[in-house]
């Protein structure tokens, strides 16, 4: 069995979660001894498509005509497309129709969580849908005191600063407006947001938020994974105020680094994250503020070990085994 792992327009998506997922799939298959190619002109037995552009759809159609099995990876939903880029809410119904057209062009669908699987089923998609995590590179993302010092030195934080970090695109859905508001409410703590989106592609209120001038608020932009893991090690709290996700790879990265984590209490995280058991959850801005203070001032139990176990269960070796089983099932159909 040889697999074509395909992602369209990598220069555009390489800094996104979808771009990172391709890297995870490559490593997951390597750990399980499965040969793969990234070249559509190569020979292969099955194609695993990660993107929803026209070239991706055309590849799926061409593969089916050639008798090659197609696994379509559903990273996006209409729900997580809304409140993102300019006019996203206006065109989201048409985006949903295109998603359905792409996803149903495969022999089966993989999506990261039971929650996103449920959303796709509600779309009326009748293909077999598997929920498989995008996985986490456990060996790479781990707590390291040396990297903690590197982070604080690189970004000019003192050893005593209490730092709240977040990672994501500059879009409303990710909770960036709430993050800025929290920095305003808590000037005694440092807030740093990693990630980037061209400001011409988002509403003006997002651009205004990113340009907010506060002595405790920083937007260093996109950084590579080796720098990001120093931030996971060196910060005091990872906050994930997103309103909608299909999984959230950066959340798994923070958990793998045994970072304190505060997430928004949204449906996707029901069933695998419990407030006060393996992470902390908040719904309102006031709750985020109160729980941020409690965590940073150590007024609540440390849950980093419990959170780490959630990430460990999603190691790339484990994810690779699940992918191989799905591939074999599809090839045998």
Image: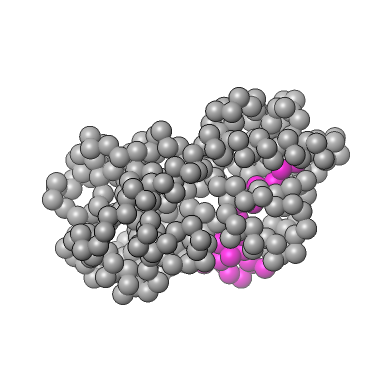
The number of discs equals 0
Whether residue 138 appears in magenta in the rendering, the answer is no
Q: Is residue 237 left or right of residue 141?
A: left
Which residue is at a point 49% across and 39% down the rendered structure image? 315
Viewer-proximal residue, 266 or 207?
266
**Do we see residue 83 in this rendering?**
yes
Please tell me in which quadrant of the rendered image residue 48 appears.
top right
Q: Where is residue 266 in the image (x, y as percent from the top left)?
A: 48, 67
Q: Where is residue 142 in the image (x, y as percent from the top left)?
A: 34, 38
Q: In this view, does 229 lie to the left or right of 133?
A: left
Viewer-proximal residue, 331 or 214?
331
Q: Is residue 143 left or right of residue 153?
A: right
Whether residue 82 appears in magenta in the rendering, the answer is yes
Q: In this view, does 56 lie to the left or right of 79?
A: right
Is 53 rendered above or below residue 47?
below
Which residue is at a point 25% across and 52% down the rendered structure image? 236
Which residue is at a point 41% across and 33% down the rendered structure image? 139
Quarter holding the C terminus is top right
Quarter holding the N terminus is top right
Q: Which colour scheme is used?
A: one colour
Q: Where is residue 305 in the image (x, y as percent from the top left)?
A: 33, 48
Q: Where is residue 63 in the image (x, y as percent from the top left)?
A: 80, 38
Q: Give the range drawn in magenta.
A: 70-95
């Amino acid at each position: 069995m040889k697999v074509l792992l395909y992602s369209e327009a990598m220069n555009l998506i390489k800094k996104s979660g979808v771009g990172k997922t391709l890297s995870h799939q490559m490593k997951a298959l390597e750990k399980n001894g499965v040969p793969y190619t990234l070249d559509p002109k190569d020979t292969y037995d099955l194609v695993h498509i990660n993107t929803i552009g026209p070239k991706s759809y055309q590849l799926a159609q061409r593969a089916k005509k050639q008798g090659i099995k197609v696994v379509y990876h559903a990273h996006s939903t209409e729900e997580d497309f809304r409140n993102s880029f300019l006019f996203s809410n206006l065109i989201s119904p048409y985006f949903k129709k295109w998603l359905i057209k792409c996803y149903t062009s495969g022999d089966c669908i993989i999506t990261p969580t039971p929650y996103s699987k449920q959303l796709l089923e509600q779309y009326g998609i009748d293909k077999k849908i598997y929920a498989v995590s995008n996985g986490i590179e456990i060996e790479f993302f781990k707590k390291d005191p040396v990297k903690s010092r590197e982070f604080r030195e690189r970004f000019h934080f003192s050893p005593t600063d209490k730092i709240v970090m977040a990672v994501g695109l500059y879009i409303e859905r990710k909770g960036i407006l709430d993050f800025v508001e929290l920095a305003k409410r808590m000037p005694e703590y440092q807030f740093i947001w990693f990630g980037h989106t061209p400001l011409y592609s988002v509403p003006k209120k997002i651009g205004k938020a990113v340009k907010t001038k506060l002595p405790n608020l920083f937007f260093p932009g996109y950084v590579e994974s080796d720098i990001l893991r120093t931030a996971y090690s060196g910060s005091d709290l990872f906050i994930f105020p997103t309103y909608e996700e299909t999984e959230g790879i950066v959340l798994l990265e923070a958990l793998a680094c045994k970072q304190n984590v505060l997430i928004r209490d949204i449906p996707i995280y029901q069933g695998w994250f419990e407030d006060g058991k393996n992470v902390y959850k908040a719904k309102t801005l006031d709750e985020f503020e109160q729980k941020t203070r409690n965590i940073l001032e150590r007024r609540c139990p440390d849950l980093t070990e419990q959170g780490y176990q959630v990430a460990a269960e999603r190691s790339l070796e484990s994810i690779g085994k699940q992918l191989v089983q799905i591939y074999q099932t599809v090839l045998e159909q």
